[in-house]
Amino acid sequence: MKILITGACGFAGSTLALELKRRIEGLEILGLDNLSRPGSERNRHALRQQGIRFLHGDIRNPADLEDLPKADWLIDAAANPSVLAGVSGTASSRQLMEHNLIGTIHLLEYCKRHGAGLIMLSTSRVYSAARLSALPMDVTKGAFVPRFSSAREPGLSPEGLGEDFSTQPPLSLYGSAKLASEILILEYGAAFDLPVFVNRCGVLAGAGQFGKPDQGIFTFWIHSYRRKQPLTYIGFGGAGHQVRDCLHPRDLAELVSRQMRHPEKAGLVLNVAGGVANSMSLAQLSEWCASRFGRHEIGSNPAPRRYDVPWLVLDPARAAAEWNWRPATKLERVLDEIARHAEQHPEWLDISNDT
């Protein structure tokens, strides 16, 4: 089997490449990346050491895809992953759409040309930010918990958001681009008889991730806390009660390997996430860091920030039912892995945030 992984030098792409190489005998992998992210060169060397071929290219440029060899599957891990992309000033709205939507069209044309299947890494941010922000919340043990008895939202349960939770705008420019990409992928799959899968991922986290405030929040927080760098709880009263779930991408690799072996089940849209068991608030994460590194004061800014939501936890029950898949890496192990990496690489934030 031959596969093409876009965004191969990012955290998700490189982890998937290495894990799939380990899991599937005889697998040939071609990685494509534009190497625009600080630190991505390190992952390129790691891929090369494992015999994974790398090509420099940008999915926004269709010419970069024209001469790529035929693959059986394309795994799309290339994206601008920040929910603030297009509005924060670090990237224009046009750049965001070119990367996260127009790039998808170029990849679909590659798949159409070669008859390749496509597995998309989508995001929990396709769910309605407006509906999430309107949910009534209680605070329990330093974390927001929806008041399920009074919330009347289809797709919402104590186990998290199901795939049928609202995707009504506003989402964010990032979320809207990913949702539009999901629709296009499903349409291409139906129109051209291509096996396609859409995996809506929670927050991916683990050692070696490039941590930034607007993405990779678990990694960023742990690295910053260990270095006693300034950290601030933003919005929602400035207490850090907002909650997210996390998933290690090696667990995602197990599901992806099963999907490639069973193209007859194509067309599914799945939440692929840590769920309630692998979720915590920023305040709880700070307490975990304090027990590991010693106490560090956190600032408070109660002013709301665009696109922030108080609680976003995905329910992976459909993935469990369809694929017998569940995240194997527990939250404590993910955090410990990041912390050990932070202790061994005190310069990591400087590498991954170098401008």
Image (cartoon, rainbow, N blue to C red):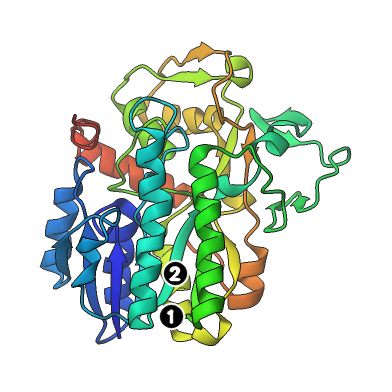
- The answer to which image quadrant residue 95 occupies is top left
Label 1 SS = helix
Q: Which residue is mark 2?
A: 119
Q: Is residue 148 left or right of residue 319?
A: right
What residue do we see at 49% from left, 48% from top? 177
Tell me how many marks there are: 2
Q: Amino acid at mark 2?
A: Ile
Residue 261 drawn above or below residue 68: below
x%, y% of residue 248?
43, 56
Q: Amino acid at mark 1?
A: Met
What residue do we see at 50% from left, 66% from top? 185
Residue 127 drawn above or below residue 63: above
Question: How many neighbours does mark 1 have within 10 angstroms: few (below 14), some (14-19), or many (20 or more)?
Answer: many
Q: Which residue is mark 1?
A: 260
Question: How many neighbours does mark 2 have within 10 angstroms: few (below 14), some (14-19), or many (20 or more)?
Answer: many
Mark 2 and mark 1: Cα distance apart in space: 8 Å
- Which mark is on residue 201? none
What residue do we see at 52% from left, 63% from top? 184
* Quadrant (top left/top right/bottom left/bottom right) for the C terminus: top left
Camera sees residue 330: no
